[in-house]
Image (spheres, rainbow, N blue to C red):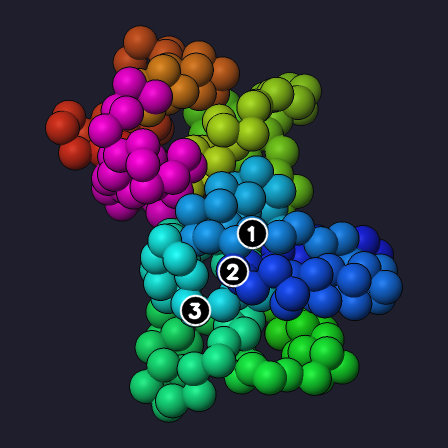
Amino acid sequence: MPTQARVLVVDDDAQILRALRVNLRARDYAVDTAETGTAALRAAGERHPDLVVLDLGLPDMEGVDVVHGLRGWTRVPIIVLSGRAGSSDKVEALEAGADDYVTKPFDIAELVARIRAVTRRAVPSDAAPVVAVGHGTVDLPARTVRAADGTPVRLTPTEWHLLEILVRNPGRLVTQRHLLTEVWGPSYTAETHYLRQYMAQLRRKLEPDPARPRHLLTEPGMGYRFQP
Protein backbone atom coordinates (compact mmCIF):
# COMPACT_ATOMS: atom_id res chain seq x y z
CA MET A 1 0.00 0.00 0.00
CA PRO A 2 1.15 3.59 -0.56
CA THR A 3 2.21 5.69 2.41
CA GLN A 4 -0.80 6.85 4.41
CA ALA A 5 -3.15 4.43 2.72
CA ARG A 6 -6.61 4.83 4.21
CA VAL A 7 -8.34 1.96 6.05
CA LEU A 8 -11.99 2.11 7.11
CA VAL A 9 -12.64 -0.05 10.18
CA VAL A 10 -16.29 -0.92 10.81
CA ASP A 11 -17.20 -2.47 14.16
CA ASP A 12 -19.63 -1.69 16.99
CA ASP A 13 -17.08 -2.75 19.62
CA ALA A 14 -15.39 0.44 20.84
CA GLN A 15 -12.44 -1.50 22.25
CA ILE A 16 -11.69 -3.16 18.91
CA LEU A 17 -12.04 0.16 17.08
CA ARG A 18 -9.60 1.78 19.47
CA ALA A 19 -7.10 -1.08 19.25
CA LEU A 20 -7.14 -1.18 15.46
CA ARG A 21 -6.94 2.59 15.19
CA VAL A 22 -3.83 2.68 17.40
CA ASN A 23 -2.11 -0.31 15.80
CA LEU A 24 -2.80 0.62 12.19
CA ARG A 25 -1.77 4.25 12.70
CA ALA A 26 1.45 3.00 14.27
CA ARG A 27 2.06 1.20 10.97
CA ASP A 28 1.51 4.44 9.00
CA TYR A 29 -2.08 3.86 7.87
CA ALA A 30 -4.69 6.60 7.95
CA VAL A 31 -7.68 5.16 9.81
CA ASP A 32 -11.38 6.03 9.71
CA THR A 33 -13.91 4.22 11.89
CA ALA A 34 -17.64 3.54 11.82
CA GLU A 35 -19.88 1.75 14.31
CA THR A 36 -22.87 1.10 12.05
CA GLY A 37 -23.47 -0.06 8.50
CA THR A 38 -25.09 3.23 7.56
CA ALA A 39 -22.11 5.19 8.85
CA ALA A 40 -19.75 2.80 7.02
CA LEU A 41 -21.44 3.30 3.65
CA ARG A 42 -21.45 7.06 4.14
CA ALA A 43 -17.79 7.11 5.19
CA ALA A 44 -16.78 4.96 2.23
CA GLY A 45 -18.48 7.36 -0.16
CA GLU A 46 -16.97 10.44 1.44
CA ARG A 47 -13.47 9.19 2.28
CA HIS A 48 -12.81 6.58 -0.45
CA PRO A 49 -10.75 4.15 1.66
CA ASP A 50 -8.10 1.92 0.15
CA LEU A 51 -9.37 -1.03 2.22
CA VAL A 52 -12.32 -1.84 4.50
CA VAL A 53 -12.13 -4.03 7.63
CA LEU A 54 -15.71 -5.01 8.40
CA ASP A 55 -17.52 -6.76 11.25
CA LEU A 56 -20.63 -8.78 10.34
CA GLY A 57 -22.72 -8.11 13.44
CA LEU A 58 -23.63 -4.42 13.25
CA PRO A 59 -26.50 -2.79 15.17
CA ASP A 60 -28.44 -1.47 12.15
CA MET A 61 -27.76 -4.02 9.40
CA GLU A 62 -25.83 -7.16 8.59
CA GLY A 63 -22.24 -6.71 7.48
CA VAL A 64 -23.04 -8.75 4.38
CA ASP A 65 -25.49 -6.00 3.38
CA VAL A 66 -22.66 -3.49 3.72
CA VAL A 67 -20.56 -5.66 1.40
CA HIS A 68 -23.39 -5.70 -1.14
CA GLY A 69 -23.74 -1.93 -0.80
CA LEU A 70 -20.06 -1.32 -1.41
CA ARG A 71 -19.88 -3.72 -4.31
CA GLY A 72 -22.60 -1.72 -6.04
CA TRP A 73 -20.04 0.96 -6.87
CA THR A 74 -16.50 0.09 -5.76
CA ARG A 75 -13.99 -2.76 -5.89
CA VAL A 76 -12.22 -1.62 -2.72
CA PRO A 77 -10.74 -4.66 -0.91
CA ILE A 78 -12.88 -5.83 2.03
CA ILE A 79 -11.64 -7.99 4.90
CA VAL A 80 -14.36 -9.35 7.15
CA LEU A 81 -13.31 -9.44 10.81
CA SER A 82 -15.94 -11.39 12.72
CA GLY A 83 -16.60 -13.59 15.71
CA ARG A 84 -18.72 -15.86 13.50
CA ALA A 85 -16.57 -18.87 12.73
CA GLY A 86 -19.12 -20.98 10.85
CA SER A 87 -18.34 -21.95 7.29
CA SER A 88 -21.75 -20.73 6.10
CA ASP A 89 -21.00 -17.21 7.38
CA LYS A 90 -17.65 -17.22 5.63
CA VAL A 91 -19.11 -18.47 2.36
CA GLU A 92 -21.92 -15.90 2.45
CA ALA A 93 -19.51 -13.02 3.05
CA LEU A 94 -17.06 -14.13 0.38
CA GLU A 95 -19.80 -14.74 -2.17
CA ALA A 96 -21.18 -11.27 -1.45
CA GLY A 97 -17.83 -9.82 -2.49
CA ALA A 98 -15.52 -9.83 0.53
CA ASP A 99 -11.87 -10.57 -0.26
CA ASP A 100 -10.83 -12.30 2.97
CA TYR A 101 -12.26 -13.45 6.31
CA VAL A 102 -10.50 -13.23 9.68
CA THR A 103 -12.08 -14.76 12.79
CA LYS A 104 -12.03 -13.05 16.20
CA PRO A 105 -10.06 -13.20 18.42
CA PHE A 106 -7.30 -12.20 16.02
CA ASP A 107 -3.62 -11.39 16.02
CA ILE A 108 -2.90 -7.84 14.82
CA ALA A 109 0.26 -8.92 12.98
CA GLU A 110 -1.73 -11.53 11.04
CA LEU A 111 -4.42 -8.97 10.21
CA VAL A 112 -1.84 -6.50 8.91
CA ALA A 113 -0.26 -9.26 6.81
CA ARG A 114 -3.67 -10.06 5.31
CA ILE A 115 -4.30 -6.37 4.63
CA ARG A 116 -1.04 -6.20 2.70
CA ALA A 117 -1.72 -9.44 0.83
CA VAL A 118 -5.26 -8.45 -0.19
CA THR A 119 -4.06 -5.05 -1.35
CA ARG A 120 -1.30 -6.59 -3.46
CA ARG A 121 -3.86 -8.83 -5.17
CA ALA A 122 -6.12 -5.83 -5.75
CA VAL A 123 -3.49 -3.69 -7.49
CA PRO A 124 -4.32 -4.77 -11.09
CA SER A 125 -7.96 -3.81 -10.67
CA ASP A 126 -6.89 -0.28 -9.77
CA ALA A 127 -6.15 0.24 -13.46
CA ALA A 128 -9.84 0.98 -14.04
CA PRO A 129 -10.82 2.49 -17.37
CA VAL A 130 -10.91 6.12 -18.32
CA VAL A 131 -14.52 6.57 -19.41
CA ALA A 132 -15.71 9.08 -22.02
CA VAL A 133 -18.81 11.07 -21.07
CA GLY A 134 -19.81 13.46 -23.81
CA HIS A 135 -16.72 15.41 -24.82
CA GLY A 136 -15.03 14.81 -21.46
CA THR A 137 -13.37 11.92 -19.66
CA VAL A 138 -13.84 10.35 -16.23
CA ASP A 139 -10.67 8.84 -14.76
CA LEU A 140 -11.94 6.38 -12.16
CA PRO A 141 -8.59 5.46 -10.53
CA ALA A 142 -7.57 9.12 -10.20
CA ARG A 143 -11.13 10.23 -9.35
CA THR A 144 -10.87 13.15 -11.74
CA VAL A 145 -12.97 14.52 -14.59
CA ARG A 146 -11.60 16.54 -17.50
CA ALA A 147 -13.24 18.43 -20.32
CA ALA A 148 -12.28 17.85 -23.96
CA ASP A 149 -9.53 20.50 -23.76
CA GLY A 150 -8.03 18.83 -20.68
CA THR A 151 -9.21 21.35 -18.12
CA PRO A 152 -10.45 19.87 -14.84
CA VAL A 153 -14.19 19.66 -14.24
CA ARG A 154 -14.81 20.23 -10.56
CA LEU A 155 -17.34 17.92 -8.93
CA THR A 156 -18.61 17.91 -5.36
CA PRO A 157 -18.09 14.65 -3.40
CA THR A 158 -21.79 13.83 -3.83
CA GLU A 159 -21.68 14.49 -7.58
CA TRP A 160 -18.61 12.27 -7.89
CA HIS A 161 -20.19 9.45 -5.89
CA LEU A 162 -23.29 9.43 -8.11
CA LEU A 163 -21.24 9.61 -11.29
CA GLU A 164 -18.89 6.83 -10.19
CA ILE A 165 -21.75 4.44 -9.45
CA LEU A 166 -23.29 5.08 -12.86
CA VAL A 167 -20.13 4.83 -14.97
CA ARG A 168 -19.08 1.63 -13.20
CA ASN A 169 -22.36 0.12 -14.40
CA PRO A 170 -22.42 1.11 -18.09
CA GLY A 171 -25.70 0.45 -19.82
CA ARG A 172 -27.35 -0.85 -16.65
CA LEU A 173 -30.35 0.63 -14.90
CA VAL A 174 -29.35 1.80 -11.42
CA THR A 175 -32.47 2.23 -9.32
CA GLN A 176 -33.35 5.37 -7.41
CA ARG A 177 -33.42 3.37 -4.19
CA HIS A 178 -29.94 1.98 -4.80
CA LEU A 179 -28.45 5.41 -5.52
CA LEU A 180 -30.12 7.07 -2.55
CA THR A 181 -29.04 4.27 -0.21
CA GLU A 182 -25.44 4.25 -1.44
CA VAL A 183 -24.94 8.01 -1.48
CA TRP A 184 -27.09 9.30 1.37
CA GLY A 185 -28.01 6.18 3.39
CA PRO A 186 -30.99 3.85 3.92
CA SER A 187 -33.12 6.53 5.60
CA TYR A 188 -33.14 8.68 2.43
CA THR A 189 -34.83 6.29 0.00
CA ALA A 190 -37.84 8.60 -0.44
CA GLU A 191 -35.79 11.73 -1.20
CA THR A 192 -35.89 11.37 -4.98
CA HIS A 193 -35.62 15.15 -5.41
CA TYR A 194 -31.99 14.82 -4.28
CA LEU A 195 -31.30 12.71 -7.34
CA ARG A 196 -33.07 15.11 -9.71
CA GLN A 197 -31.07 18.03 -8.35
CA TYR A 198 -27.66 16.37 -8.50
CA MET A 199 -28.23 14.69 -11.84
CA ALA A 200 -29.16 18.08 -13.31
CA GLN A 201 -25.88 19.46 -11.95
CA LEU A 202 -23.89 16.58 -13.47
CA ARG A 203 -25.55 17.06 -16.84
CA ARG A 204 -24.72 20.77 -16.85
CA LYS A 205 -21.09 19.89 -16.22
CA LEU A 206 -20.74 16.87 -18.52
CA GLU A 207 -23.39 16.66 -21.22
CA PRO A 208 -22.88 18.59 -24.50
CA ASP A 209 -26.60 19.47 -24.37
CA PRO A 210 -27.87 19.16 -20.79
CA ALA A 211 -31.48 19.61 -21.89
CA ARG A 212 -31.18 16.56 -24.14
CA PRO A 213 -28.77 14.23 -22.31
CA ARG A 214 -27.22 11.40 -24.28
CA HIS A 215 -25.16 9.73 -21.54
CA LEU A 216 -26.73 10.38 -18.13
CA LEU A 217 -30.24 9.14 -18.80
CA THR A 218 -33.37 9.09 -16.66
CA GLU A 219 -35.57 6.00 -16.61
CA PRO A 220 -38.82 7.58 -15.38
CA GLY A 221 -40.05 6.18 -12.11
CA MET A 222 -37.19 3.70 -11.91
CA GLY A 223 -33.74 5.25 -11.84
CA TYR A 224 -30.83 6.32 -14.03
CA ARG A 225 -28.56 4.81 -16.61
CA PHE A 226 -25.12 5.72 -17.95
CA GLN A 227 -25.08 5.23 -21.70
CA PRO A 228 -21.48 5.22 -23.04
Residue wearing tag 3: 56
Q: Earlier in the sequence, mark 3 or mark 1?
A: 1
Residue in view at x 48 percent, y 80 percent: 83
Residue in the image at 56% along x and 82% along y: 104
Label 1 secondary element: strand
| Cβ atoms at labels 3 and 2 below 8 Å apart | no
Quarter of the image where the C terminus is located: top left
Circles 1 and 2: CB distance less than 8 Å? no
What residue did someone put label 1 on? 34
Q: Is residue 168 magenta?
A: yes
Q: Sequence order check: which comes first, mark 1 or mark 2?
A: 2
Mark 3 or mark 2: name the one nearer the start of the chain: 2
Asked whether disc 3 touches disc 1, contact meaning CB atoms under 8 Å apart, the reply is no
Residue closest to the eye, 1 or 187: 187
Mark 2 = which residue?
Answer: 12
Q: What element carries label 3?
A: loop
| Label 3, label 1: how far apart the Cα atoms are | 13 Å
- Residue 195 found in image quarter: top left
195 relative position to 138: left or right: left
- Per the rendered image, the range of residues in magenta is 167-194
Residue at the (61%, 60%) spot, across then down: 14
Q: Is residue 83 visible?
A: yes
* Place of residue 163 in the rendered image (x, y in percent of width and height, measured from the top left): 45, 33
Q: What residue type is labelled 1?
A: Ala
